[in-house]
Image (cartoon, rainbow, N blue to C red):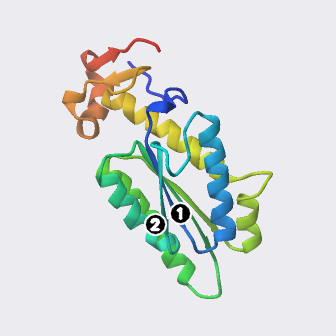
Amino acid sequence: MAVFEGTFSHTQELRLAIVIGRFNDQITGKLLAACQDCLKRHGIDVDPEGRQVDYAWVPGSFEVPIVARHLAITHRYDAIICLGAVIRGQTPHFDYVAAEVAKGIAAAGFQTGVPVVFGIITADTLQQALERAGIKSNKGWDYAMNALEMASLMRQLKGGSAAGYAVNPAQGVFHSLPSTLASDATAETRLPEA
């Protein structure tokens, strides 16, 4: 049996997109800064004029999924990071927005096969949201790490990485992966270590 696990090397090969909601920008700006810091420390060129990361700004979290899906269907990106903040108010609006954003982001990934990272802070209060995007603990870093790991893992599964194991791409990743891992050892290929 093979073990598939994303790595944090070979990042110079990756292309990422980050979709950021402007609403609650005191939160999303901090998430973006931590996300960029993490990516930079892992060798990614985060400059908007560079070749590795594209940025898409949208009005708020509700608009994030449609742009993420649009970017994902191009298959130009190894992963897409979605950043936003939805804070509970006095009406049920929070519940509707948070649920639909979560469904939309998940659907973008499932429908395209591109990892789409859910980086939407959902909090009952502004203080809770600020704590999740603060100096001690900023979830933006975690979202970037998730994207790097998933991008690497998906490249391995598709046979496009120089490190780790890969499934034979001719078998199709999404439809045959579970049966391949469970019963077809001949589909495994050990690629050379970088």
Q: What residue type is labelled 2?
A: Val
Q: Name the residue under label 1.
A: 20
Mark 1 crowd level (few <14, some 14–19, many ≥20, 10 Å Cα): many
The foreground one among 88 and 17 is 17
List x then y, in percent, for residue 112: 30, 51
What's the distance in space between the residues labelled 2 and 1, CA to CA? 7 Å
List x then y, in percent, for residue 173: 28, 35
- Identity of the residue furthest to the right in this view: 136
Asked if one can make out residue 107 in the rendered structure from this viewpoint, the answer is no
Quadrant of the image occupied by residue 41: top right
The foreground one among 26 and 12 is 12
Return the disc, 2 or 1, that comes first in the chain's sequence.
1
User: At 54% from the left edge and 43% from the top edge, which residue is drawn?
Assistant: 146
Seen in the picture, residue 131 relative to 41 is either above or below; the reply is below
- Identity of the residue furthest to the left in this view: 170
Seen in the picture, residue 70 relative to 88 is either above or below; the reply is above
Left/right placement of residue 143 relative to residue 108 reads: right
Q: Name the residue under label 2.
A: 64
Q: Report the number of discs.
A: 2
The foreground one among 193 and 56 is 56
- SS of the residue under disc 2: helix
Q: What residue type is labelled 1?
A: Ile
Seen in the picture, residue 136 relative to 173 is either above or below; the reply is below
List x then y, in percent, for residue 122: 61, 67
List x then y, in percent, for residue 94: 56, 78
The foreground one among 139 and 106 is 139
Q: Which mark is residue 78?
A: none
Whether residues under marks 2 and 1 lie with C-beta atoms below 8 angstroms apart, the answer is: yes
- Identity of the residue furthest to the front in this view: 49
